[in-house]
Amino acid sequence: MKISRRRFLTHAIGTGMVGLTSYSAFRQFVPSLPAISIDFPGKKLGHTLRNASVNPPANIPKVHTNIAIIGSGVAALSAAWQLSRHGVYDYVLLEGPEYNGNNRGEKQYGVPYPTGAHYLPLPSAESTHIQQLLTDLQLYQNGQYQEQALLQVPNERLFYQHYWQDRLLPQQDQDSERFFRFVHHTSDQLGKDGKRLFAIPLVSSSNDMQWRQLERITFAEWLQQQNYTSTTLLWYLDYCCRDDYGQGINQVSAWAGLHYFCARGNQQSEHGSILTWPDGLNELSQQMRQFCQLKPADGWQNATKLRSQSLALNASAISISEHDRGVRILMQTIRGQFYWLECTYAVCAMPLYIAIYIVKNIQQYGFDPALHLPAYAPWIVGNFLLQGLPPETPTAPLSWDNVLYQGQGLGYVVATHQQIRQGPPQYTSFTTYTALNHDTPANVRRWMLSASPADIYAQVAAELETIYGVKLRSRILQARLTLRGHAMAVPQPGYLSNAGLIALRSHSGRLQFAHSDLSGFSIFEEACFWGKQAAQSILTHLS
């Protein structure tokens, strides 16, 4: 529900400044906006590639490596992890425009916080690759997960009917009870091929066409067919889809909607089923880098001093061409230097909306951008650096995840929550997640490019200021807002039968593709799976 300016002002006056009777009087007492910083990672390079405005010089030097991994997100680091655990270290990671990709984190006032993904559910039965990764990183040992990484209670609450309650489902009713009985029954149900109907990774899911046909309609249409009419249940289901897919029940397929609830199985409970850190999955990415013994380098001259070691080069790929003997990459370092990188094998671990401009003749792999490119959901991640904590009502304590019923955003997480036993922090970050599905993704991206910092702040801070009032601004030391115009692929109707994605998944050659986009939706487990698959294909060729 969009909060109108009039409604917002009325609420703020009623809750924070009772007795003021005119807008002009109200204005005198509204704290000014805090310092606002806007980050649009990858925008400059992405638009340069889209507009084909890269102008490399003549006589570009040529350099060599055995394996190149293009990207620094989960898929790229997972490919590096798999190579390293098999003793292969002669590879170069071209990090691209954003360190750790959507897992990036920052630190201000001594507080680490995420600018992207912020948690990882414990692995489901089919996610053996995640169990293997967590074991290698020593986050899982002797049948136990590292206690410091397990989500601490209180873990979630919902601001509903002017009060906080300690669960996100607004209320139990006949519809919600019927829906979750269905989920419980379906979660462990097998298709005709013997696989679970819904599983992670996607390729482990059943191909039973009786269920796969649910990808032809939206989740909202399926819910209507099943006669689910509860307003609170429908809001909750829409919230969950926006949280995982960036779009709601009216945009994602029915199969994807059910996959969200059924794929992790019945063995997991809400409490203690999530791994998280103050800076979100940035910490997990950092641990993967340490496992791989990645050595950072900002130029090729520095990199040559570290040959035969795994390198993380601060550079971006400008073009990628596969040929019979290997892969040729035109890369540009952070210093602006161009090189032709000749390698025997390469992993293209970047989003497909970027890969279509970099991989030469991507149509040769069976992928036509005009037909097969997924839709991408735009997001804004806001980090509000606070001095101390705002006062809370006694109905439910401040939790890790805090959500406003019918809010346009997805609530906020508290960066210092994992240190909750140490007492109130001097500084913290409230990290808001806003999936912008109120308009078409294209229109939202246009708004992102033209909106002022104050406009973006108003969009992102609306829920916080609805809950705490505008007086919260006096505690905000800085608002750091990260705009992600193409944050994640959306599993719209038809994504399971997308011929282009299927073709890229099955390609075997010198160039491997690896990204969560291959699954049609963006979660850690899918990205890790495709990164591992790409590395295993290379290892097979090397053996």
Image (cartoon, grey):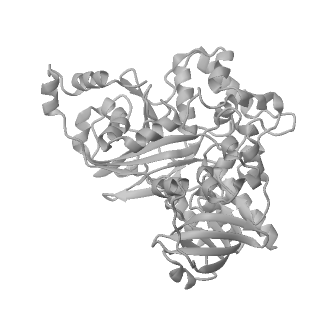
With respect to residue 334, does 98 lie above or below? Answer: above
Identify which residue, 163 or 41, lies in the foreground. 41
Residue shown at the point (73%, 38%) measured from the top left? 496
Identify which residue, 290 or 434, lies in the foreground. 434
Q: Is residue 116 left or right of residue 475?
A: right
Quadrant of the image occupied by residue 248: top right
Tell me residue 349's x, y (percent).
63, 58
* Visible residue check, residue 490: yes
Tell me residue 21's x, y (percent).
14, 19
With respect to residue 312, does 101 lie above or below? Answer: above
Q: Residue furthest front?
A: 58
- Give the quadrant of the N terminus: top left
* Visible residue check, residue 103: no
Q: Is residue 480 left or right of residue 211?
A: left
Tell me residue 67's x, y (percent).
68, 72
Q: Is residue 315 left or right of residue 537?
A: left
Residue shown at the point (56%, 61%) measured from the top left? 72
Identify which residue, 474 or 98, lies in the foreground. 98
Quadrant of the image occupied by residue 295: bottom right
- Give the total of numbered labels: 0
- Give the quadrant of the C terminus: bottom right
Residue shown at the point (21%, 42%) measured from the top left? 474
Tell me residue 388's x, y (percent).
27, 47
